[in-house]
Image (tube, rainbow, N blue to C red):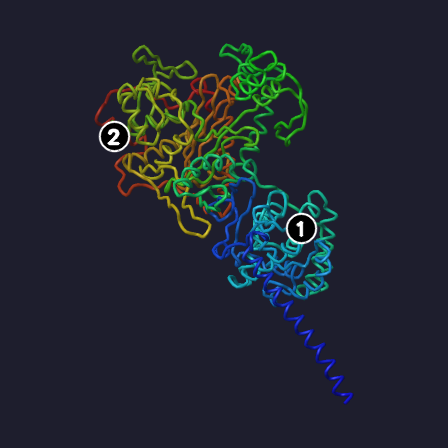
Amino acid sequence: MQIQIEKGKYYKWVVRLWIFFLAGFFLFLLYLWAVSSNLFGLFGELPSFKSIENPKSSLASVVYAIDGTTLGSYYREENRNSVDYNQLSPNIIHALVATEDVRFEQHSGIDFIGVSAIVPYLAIGKRRGSSTLTQQVARNLFPLRREEMQGAINNIVIDKTKEWLTAIQLERSYTKEEILTMYLNTVDFGSRAFGIESASRTFFQTTASKLTIPQAAMLVGMVNNPSFFSPVRHPERALRKRNFVLSKIAEHGFITEAQLAKFAAEPLNLKFRPENSTRGLATYFRAELEKELRQIARKHDKDLYTDGLRIYTTIDSRLQRYAEEAVTEQMKKQQAKFFAYWKKRNPWTTPGGAEIKNYVENIASRMPRFQQLLDYYNGNEDSVWAELRTPVRMSVFSWEGDKDTVMSSLDSIAYHKKFLQTGLLAIEPSTGQVRAWVGGIDFRHFQYDHVRQGKRQPGSTFKPILYAAAIDNAGYKPCDREWDRTITIDGWTADNYSRTFSDSLVTLRNALARSLNTIPARLTQKVGASMIVEYAKRLGIKSPLKPYPALCLGTESVSMYELLSAYATFPAAGVWHKPQYLVRIEDRNGNVLEEFHPQEQEVIGEETAYLMTYMLRGGVEEQGGSAQAIRQYKFSHGNEVGAKTGTTQNYADGWTVGITQDLAAAVWFGGDDMNIHFRDGSGAGSKTALPIFATFMEKAFSDPSVGLQKKPFTKPRVLNTELDCQKYTEALHQVDSTQYPVNTATPDSLLDPSLR
């Protein structure tokens, strides 16, 4: 009887426990249903099934070089680049899982072992860790805790519940590899680097696929608090955190104890370079490209700054780096010479040498800031000028690095105007593809692009266009001779630079090599200035040109972009290629939005083109050639190189444009303002632009990985022109027995010292 009573008593407790359990379970399910359906708007929205299936985060658009390296990104606030799982180093995966979610492969979005450890904290309203990687993805992708997704009731338990529900949905929709990839693509690493790819480039100048174990450990150590563990601001703290992550990697068997000891002893080895539009490779190119990309993106209903476009260009990162190095190395030297030349005088002068009065003030009055200040001070110019003369702290450019100083806005204008500028463009002649683009000396401080934006008088570098017209249209040959005598056409007199003449017959090749002015003038008289304009257009020069005689000497302004495309036609057998810098544009999923193909047209005969390469070789090979200094550089040895230098009036502009069979390049040198320049032969193209050109070509041909070959220019199968001028002259004498004085020597008095 006693046993039955005891049985009945236990039975009631068991029933009560079951009722309590079932009721609690039912209430829990009811709670989950209420949260998931946002009952009465109390709990806030959850991500829809569609948004989970197609999550969209803001992605920067990435610009790639033709060799696969990243040139830079376009973004508004978040520099986030996505990568696929197969682009992730195993080192970053091991570090992340070992540190953040060791049971990642076992759970289905919620780690119940971890949850049991945080329940007491949730009950009293305190935040605690132990979120799985899937939950963190839910937080990163969807604004679960932001105001727009909050309901009338808002607390930690509800937030956590929404994370759990979203995490479960993510686990149902994606594989573990996809979730890991989403996490690493969305996490914030600080320094405006969002996602592992951006972080790899920002902190180590590498890619996510090439991260070493110590690098991966440092980055994983930052994910929960990138500011607190910043290796830039708090290197010791970041080092300790990195070593903690390394210990976790070793604890879970991904590395040995010996490796742990080795890696823990290493410094951080940062290569910190935060990405923005004013830093990195090809800044001028990217700025020019951005204008075009905005229009293309709009056409495809995309946002360049948030839709993660992939932009593939023709720039070769190696050649781009060599171009920038050549500019830096040579411009440092030129600037030192320029400062020494002008000493403490201001370099803005009239052609007569007098300093231009109120030069800086006139520049300031044309700047947008002047009008802004005028509006702010209600039209009171005295107040505006007072502010512009007030010293403030600022960072200014110097060739030793940015310099923090105190100076007024007017002083800053004067300081920066004293720096000389340059531009360099390199093109592959056979395709017209742009390989390097340097628009100036430093994009952070000087944002005017001298490759395509800037137009200056080309001086003698325009002469090959005249010679091409004479050969192609009027039947001239490189060994034909013209008189080196003064000539007047329609009231304009062509003088050689030296103001002297040999009064002898000079071959066209030698005349171009020595940059004589009388011979081009005679050819212009015979060919016609209108024909020169016609050939300039054929060869890609779109700038307006006036058909007057002096045009043959390069008096009309053109861009380097146009001029080089004309020169590149000669090694390309007379086929002009529109300079191409875009290959294709893809969306974030790899779908091609637009492809770009070469635009080409045969504009001069194949033989004419080859004869022009022979003519341009004269500048390097002939005695007194304006570009003969190129022979000092190894890239010219065993190689056929053609080049032409140019110098405009008062040495305002210095040019060098050169060609080989595989690569053509142009360099311009001068001041932002034509009134700022050397006043003697130090400013000649052969002394300023040529060293930059030659240094670039030397670097380019010295790198076997670039693939440039030393080779002769491609000859036509049939060449009907005799290039041995002695034989050519003898053949002519058989027809014409008249004896003419022939210039066989090159007296120093006839050589333009500015063109040597």
Name the secondary structure under disc 2.
helix
Marked residue nearer the N-terminal end (2 or 1): 1
| Neighbourhood count class around disc 1 (C-alpha, 10 Å): few under 14, some 14–19, many 20 upward | many
Residue 164, image quadrant? bottom right
Whole-percent x, y for residue 132 in the image: 63, 60
Type of amino acid under label 2: Ala
Q: Which mark is residue 189?
A: none
Q: Is residue 377 left or right of residue 460?
A: right
Q: Is residue 692 left or right of residue 488?
A: right
Residue 275, image quadrant? top right
Q: Which mark is residue 222?
A: 1
- Location of residue 719 with respect to 510 vertically, above or below: below
Residue 271, image quadrant? top right
Type of amino acid under label 1: Met
Frontmost residue, 689 versus 589: 589
Frontmost residue, 681 versus 648: 648
Whole-percent x, y for residue 315 in the image: 46, 42
Query: What residue would you read off at disc 2?
Result: 731
Q: Is residue 452 left or right of residue 139?
A: left
Name the secondary structure under disc 1.
helix
What residue is rendered at 53% in x and 20% in y?
367
Whole-percent x, y for residue 469 in the image: 29, 28
Between the residue at mark 2 and the residue at mark 1, the CA separation in whole angstroms equals 80 Å
- Location of residue 140 with respect to 545 vertically, above or below: below
Q: Which quadrant: the N terminus?
A: bottom right
